Image (cartoon, rainbow, N blue to C red):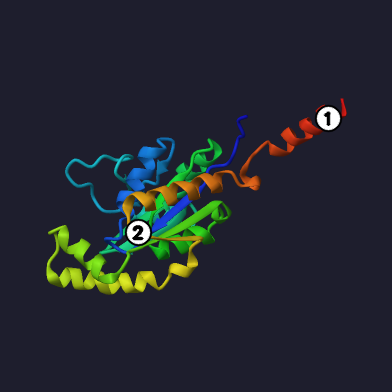
Amino acid sequence: MHMDRTGLLIILSSPSGAGKSTLARRLMEWDPTLRFSISATTRPPRPGEEDGRDYYFTTPEKFRALVADDQMLEHAEVFGNLYGSPRGPVEVAMRDGRDTLFDVDWQGGQQIRASALGGHVVSIFVLPPSLPELERRLRSRGQDSDEVIAGRMQKSRSEISHWAEYDYVLVNDDLDETEARLRAILTAERLRRDRQGGLGAFVKQLMEEGEA
């Protein structure tokens, strides 16, 4: 039996290096119907970037107008550029029964939960097994200087302090096991009674069959 349902807003957060991006990619490979939230930004496109695929590129004036019109689920200024999650595409996905995955920090998560769509949010925070392991993962990338890594580690402690604001918290000590737990969370949340559209009508039909 197929049940129509409204799409979810899945917030996935973690400190840098805890495995969030890899888990998001695996989750979308597991379920191709998942939609990844594309951010809007006021920074210019980089070589190879495409509007509507990598970002929605816009002007500061248009971005601020969207914020004023409550059309951004979350937004922030980073290094002089504005970034945010447009509300419109998410609402279209919700009506189509498709879930949207957000790769945002705790501040973005707070804003989305406080938005008009907050009742459809499932929030998940991914923790590293230890801070030394987190630092090892950051260094293994070979991309950042010691100074940058030290800054990321300091920021990680601040981000981790917000763990209790999330619905679920996963310790990513084994990537495959963490992915399996992530799938289980999504499956269970989709099956919640209040998220199965048409369930009441189906039960009414069952009861009527019993009376026949």
Residue at mark 1 to residue at mark 2: CA–CA distance: 48 Å
67 left or right of 114? Answer: left
Q: Quadrant of residue 171?
A: bottom left
Image quarter of residue 170: bottom left
Amino acid, disc 2:
Asn
Q: Which mark is residue 172?
A: 2
Seen in the image, is 145 located left or right of residue 82? left
Residue 150 vs 22, above or below: the answer is below
Q: Which residue is mark 1?
A: 210
Q: Secondary structure at mark 2?
A: loop
Q: Tell me what residue is drawn at x 30 percent, y 56 percent.
A: 19
| Amino acid beneath label 1 | Gly
Report the residue at 40% width, 73% height from top: 161
The percent position of residue 75, horizontal first and vertical second, equals 40, 59
> From the viewer's perspective, is 202 left or right of 93?
right
Which percent across, then down, holds residue 8? 52, 47
Q: Residue furthest right?
A: 211
Which quarter of the rendered picture does the C terminus lie within? top right
- Residue at position x 16%, y 63% from top? 139
Quarter of the image that includes the N terminus: top right
User: Where is 62 relative to 111, above or below?
Assistant: above
Alpha-carbon neighbours of circle 2 within 10 Å: few (<14), some, or many (≥20)? Answer: some
Residue 205, image quadrant: top right
Q: Is residue 73 above or below residue 78?
A: above
Of 114 and 32, which appears nearest the observer? 32
Residue 23 is at least partly visible in this image: yes
Whether residue 69 is visible here, answered yes or no, is no
* Residue 126, horizontal then vertical, whole percent: 38, 60
Residue 42 in percent (x, y) is at 30, 53
